[in-house]
Image (cartoon, rainbow, N blue to C red):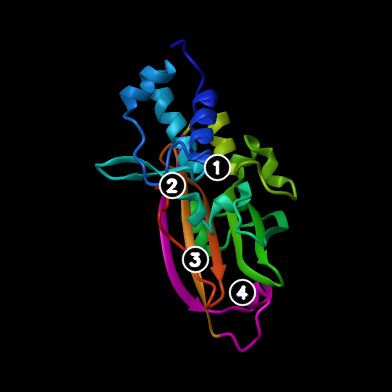
């Protein structure tokens, strides 16, 4: 067939996944098959698949290939910005500000100014999760939407990847629990007697450097489903 663009390949596969033509956990065709199907180079196919990973449409299994994600199971993470919510849930934007990177964030992206973005996901009267991300200030030169008080569409990672040509990977995903802080209780609208919260942290890298980190906090009894997740 005639050559198509990376954007057209991504759009076509998204439609197949959203329409159920490609079922959850089905393996994507090989790179060679996709190259032939869309008339693209191997690098172009890799870029398209990376975009699908960033948007939560597919995930990798080391040594086995790329598989279709079950988007119905995604209830946390950057995909929320793309509008993936369960019935009765809504995203409430909190802020996008320039601030000095907290110590633990600075350990990943370096000291100094960064862009901090925050939002919550509410189900009825209950806030199900609160999340914040800290993005390296250099990324805002390519994704100026980071400084706007609104979600990026579809995600800041996908926008950066599209404009820079650098694949963005979630290089680390860690789940844990911690003693609830005053900020946690305020963000989740929890009583002061709350002892612990659930925590998930993500690290995003491109071209061999960390460009941002994210933190999702949930109250006890409001668990985060972790699988399947794009790598």
Residue 179: percent from left, percent from top: 51, 80
Q: Which label belongs to residue 69?
A: 2
Give percent across and percent down for residue 47. 45, 30
Exactly how many numbered labels are in the figure? 4
Can see residue 110?
Answer: no
Ranked by sequence position, the earlier of labels 2 and 4 is 2
User: Regarding mark 1 in the picture, which secondary structure is present there?
Assistant: helix
How far apart are the two marked residues, 3 and 4, measured between alpha carbons? Answer: 16 Å
> Mark 4 sits on what residue?
184
Magenta stretch: includes residue 185: yes
User: On the image, numbered disc 3 is attached to which residue?
Assistant: 224
Check residue 97 for magenta coloring.
no
Mark 2 and mark 1: span between their CA atoms?
18 Å
204 on left or right of 122: left
Q: Earlier in the sequence, mark 2 or mark 3?
A: 2
Q: Secondary structure at mark 3?
A: loop
- Left or right side of 128 for 62: left
At horizontal 47% and vertical 13% (from top left) the residue drawn is 3
Within 10 Å of disc 4 (Cα), the crowding (few <14, some 14-19, many 20+) is many
Query: Which label's residue is closer to the chain start, 3 or 1?
Result: 1
In space, the residues marked 3 and 1 are separated at their CA atoms by 21 Å
Classify residue 193 as left or right of residue 13. Answer: right
Q: Residue at x 59, y 51 (%)?
A: 84
Mark in the foreground, 3 or 4: 3
On the question of residue 54 being in view, the answer is yes
Residues at discs 2 and 3 in contact (Cβ within 8 Å): no
């Amino acid at each position: 067939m005639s050559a198509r663009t990376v954007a057209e390949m991504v759009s076509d596969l998204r439609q197949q996944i959203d329409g159920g033509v490609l079922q959850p956990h089905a393996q994507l065709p090989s790179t060679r098959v996709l190259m032939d199907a869309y008339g693209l180079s191997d690098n172009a196919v890799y870029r398209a698949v990376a975009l699908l990973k960033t948007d939560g449409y597919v995930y990798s299994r080391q040594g086995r290939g790329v598989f279709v994600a079950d988007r119905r199971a995604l209830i946390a993470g950057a995909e929320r910005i793309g509008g993936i919510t369960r019935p009765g849930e809504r995203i409430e934007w909190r802020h996008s500000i320039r601030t000095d990177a907290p110590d633990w964030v600075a350990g990943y992206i370096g000291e100094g100014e960064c862009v901090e973005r925050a939002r919550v996901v509410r189900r009825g009267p209950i806030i199900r999760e609160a999340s914040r991300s800290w993005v390296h200030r250099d990324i805002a030169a390519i994704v100026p939407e980071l400084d706007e008080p609104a979600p990026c569409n579809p995600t800041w990672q996908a926008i950066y990847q599209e404009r820079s040509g650098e694949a963005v990977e979630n290089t680390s995903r860690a789940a844990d629990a911690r003693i609830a802080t005053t900020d946690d209780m305020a963000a989740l609208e929890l009583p002061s007697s709350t002892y612990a919260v659930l925590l998930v942290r993500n690290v995003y890298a491109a071209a061999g450097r960390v460009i941002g980190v994210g933190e999702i906090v949930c109250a006890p009894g409001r668990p985060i489903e972790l699988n399947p997740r794009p790598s």
